[in-house]
Image (cartoon, rainbow, N blue to C red):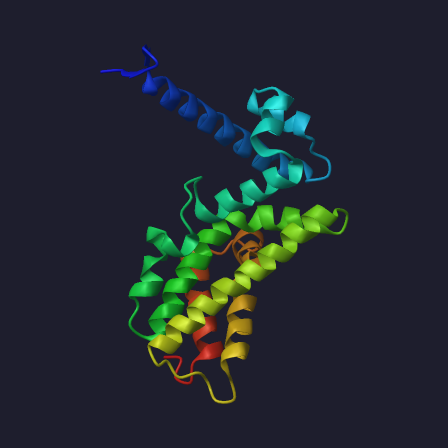
Amino acid sequence: MDEVKDGKPTRPYRSRIREENARRTRQAVVAAATELFVARGYTATSLADVAAAAGVARPTVFAAFGSKAALLRQVLDEALAGDDEPVPVAQRPWYRPVWEATTGGAVLDAYAGVCTLIGARTTRVFETVRRAADGSPEVAEVWRTLLRNRRLGATMVVERMGALDARLRQGSDVETAIDEVWFYNDPAHYGALVLERGWREETFRRWLGRSLRHALLSDPD
């Protein structure tokens, strides 16, 4: 039954339809922006270009995101997460093996799987941001945020290892371990070995897990 307000029936389902239509529009814009940013570069792509590719008006894009830099941040967020749901990466089902691992080595193997998955989705977008950062203060801030977030991710991994009493290699400490995970979680490694050199993803995942173990653990095997 419809709700009644001020003697007039309202139709909540109309609001749901509008919300779903708005979400589909945003998804189309993000998909178009992702393709154009990667193919043409951030600087060479305008909001009008994105709107045309998405099949919407430029004011629609501006109303949904506010600026090209904000749209770029949304592109990155969805590439990292895999969709537009407001769920942090660390709470995603595909991140769960990191939390469920019971040894330091198993944590690093699970995290190698996470990095492989994220690399497949983000490598080209990350490179687009890196190239544009020199010419745009707004994009430079996006790039710095990416670097900070990668280190936060590395910190979570090392803290999880610490909770399991994993022994770091001799001469290492927590800050060094975080730096090392931060180095290895760079999607550029996926780009170099999988996209450029043609490695299979499973080969890359095993290499990354092995590299993390040898870098961090006193007993990598």
Relative to 42, residue 218 above or below: below
Q: Whole-percent x and y of residue 52?
A: 62, 22
The residue shown at (56%, 30%) is 64
The residue shown at (35%, 64%) is 98
Determine the image quadrant of residue 84: top left
Query: Does residue 74 appear anywhere in the picture?
Result: yes
Q: Whole-percent x and y of residue 202?
A: 40, 58
Figure quadrant of the C terminus: bottom left
- Farthest front residue in view: 6
Query: Does residue 131 appear anywhere in the picture?
Result: no
The residue shown at (49%, 43%) is 78
Figure quadrant of the N terminus: top left
Determine the image quadrant of residue 40: top right
- Farthest bottom residue in view: 170
Q: Whole-percent x and y of residue 25?
A: 50, 25
Relative to 182, residue 52 above or below: above
The residue shown at (54%, 61%) is 150
